[in-house]
């Protein structure tokens, strides 16, 4: 059964009228105001990170969170890649440019001068609703275009943490994974044989992620045993993020059951004893690969989901439990 996730904050925005006013270039904060949510008119889409929007007469450029822009694609790619990029932009323009009921939610402030803020972008349009796809789980009649780009094979997933907890507009990890699975299983876009850019762009996405993550092809696999042994010999409070990432990658290899169990136990202890937010985030993502059959790990994830005060960490644990049907 398809599970719908209804957004009580974004849906009403789809019905909010746009204010007729002269369009003037503005700071992105003028578009969002105090709410970090805004009903907008999309006036131009040059790339996934160069989308011009207008709200209340204020014009600014925003970028979709959780996805790679087409400018990140390698130069000299096959002709099919150029055709896919053109098709993707045409599709997005036809559904968003000069259309009604488009809303954006702020995910992250710009991290560099002249950079665009990262946003979620949704549109209430029942005739376009993909109710059986991850992009359609946002609410009745609503399409989430960040997820649409992933499930359509326009982009891999780029994990990006919100810069302020109050924004709470990140692409949900579970939905992003589901959208990616839809694209890969259907050999859509970059995952299809004609374009075949998925693996390369997945590596690029991993390097651009925040906090950074690693994928298997970017590591010397012979270093896994040494990295795991270093991790196991570490003092709980002195474990570094790089060691946790090595463990994350090692979990995806053929670790023997006893070593896997020891690493899981160490990571759980590290989570309890180290308050660093980024380290704890990496630990939870690593434990997600730690083994579904580990009862103590299940109990640990339930504890984090129930008692963790940090909403981002709590959401990661809840997402992990949902992914195994708990």
Image (cartoon, helix red, strand yellow):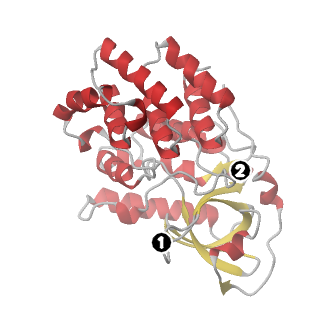
> x%, y% of residue 90?
51, 64
The residue pinned by badge 1 equals 112
Neighbour class for label 2 at 10 Å: few (<14), some, many (≥20)? few
Identify which residue is drawn at 71% across, 62% down.
Answer: 36
- In the image, residue 154 sits, relative to residue 267, either above or below, namely below
Distance in Å between CA atoms under marks 1 and 2? 38 Å
Q: Return the residue nearer the eye: 129 or 134.
A: 134
Residue visible at 33% across and 58% down? Answer: 81
Quadrant in the picture for residue 251: top left
Q: Is residue 285 above or below residue 127?
A: above
Element class at badge 2: helix
Look at the picture and state if 75 lies above or below 254.
below
Quadrant (top left, top right, bottom left, bottom right) of the N terminus? top right
Left or right: where 151 falls relative to 255: right
**Is 65 placed above or below 322 here?**
below
Visible in this render: residue 130?
A: no
Quick one: SS at disc 1?
A: loop
Label drawn at residue 3: none
Callout 1 crowding tier (Cα within 10 Å): few <14, some 14–19, many ≥20: few
Front: mark 1 or 2: 1
Q: Earlier in the sequence, mark 1 or mark 2?
A: 1
Q: Nearest the camera: 98 or 17?
A: 17
What quarter of the picture does the C terminus occupy? top right
On the image, the x and y values in percent for residue 40 come to 71, 68
Residue 201 visible to the viewer: yes
Q: Where is residue 167? Give x, y as percent.
A: 67, 55
Q: Please name the residue that numbered disc 2 is placed on.
A: 127
């Amino acid at each position: 059964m398809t599970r719908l996730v209804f957004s009580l904050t974004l849906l009403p925005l789809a019905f909010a009228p746009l204010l007729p006013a002269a369009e003037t270039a503005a700071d992105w904060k003028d578009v969002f105001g105090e709410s970090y949510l805004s009903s907008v008119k999309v006036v131009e889409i040059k790339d996934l990170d160069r989308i011009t929007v207008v709200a209340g007469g204020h014009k600014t450029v925003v970028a979709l969170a959780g996805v790679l822009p087409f400018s990140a694609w390698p130069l000299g790619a096959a002709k099919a890649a150029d055709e896919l990029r053109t098709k993707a932009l045409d599709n997005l323009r036809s559904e968003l440019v000069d259309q009604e009921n488009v809303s954006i939610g702020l995910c992250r402030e710009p991290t560099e001068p002249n950079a665009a803020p990262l946003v979620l972008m949704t549109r209430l349009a029942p005739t376009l609703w993909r109710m059986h796809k991850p992009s359609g789980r946002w609410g009745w009649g609503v399409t989430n275009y960040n997820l649409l780009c992933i499930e359509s094979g326009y982009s891999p997933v780029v994990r990006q943490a919100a810069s302020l907890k109050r924004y709470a507009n990140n692409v949900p990890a579970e939905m992003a994974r589901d959208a990616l699975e839809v694209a890969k299983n259907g050999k859509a876009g970059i995952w299809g044989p004609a374009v075949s850019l998925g693996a390369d762009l997945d590596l690029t996405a991993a390097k651009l992620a925040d906090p950074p993550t690693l994928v298997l092809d970017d590591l010397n696999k012979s270093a896994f045993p040494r990295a795991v042994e270093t991790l196991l010999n570490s003092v709980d409070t002195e474990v570094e993020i790089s060691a946790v990432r090595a463990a994350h990658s090692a979990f995806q290899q053929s670790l023997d059951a006893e070593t896997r169990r020891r690493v899981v136990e160490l990571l759980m202890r590290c989570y309890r004893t180290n308050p660093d937010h980024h380290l704890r985030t990496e630990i939870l993502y690593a434990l997600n690969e730690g083994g579904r059959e580990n009862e103590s790990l299940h109990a640990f994830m339930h504890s984090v989901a129930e008692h963790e005060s940090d909403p981002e960490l709590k959401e990661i644990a809840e997402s992990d439990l949902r992914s195994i049907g708990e």
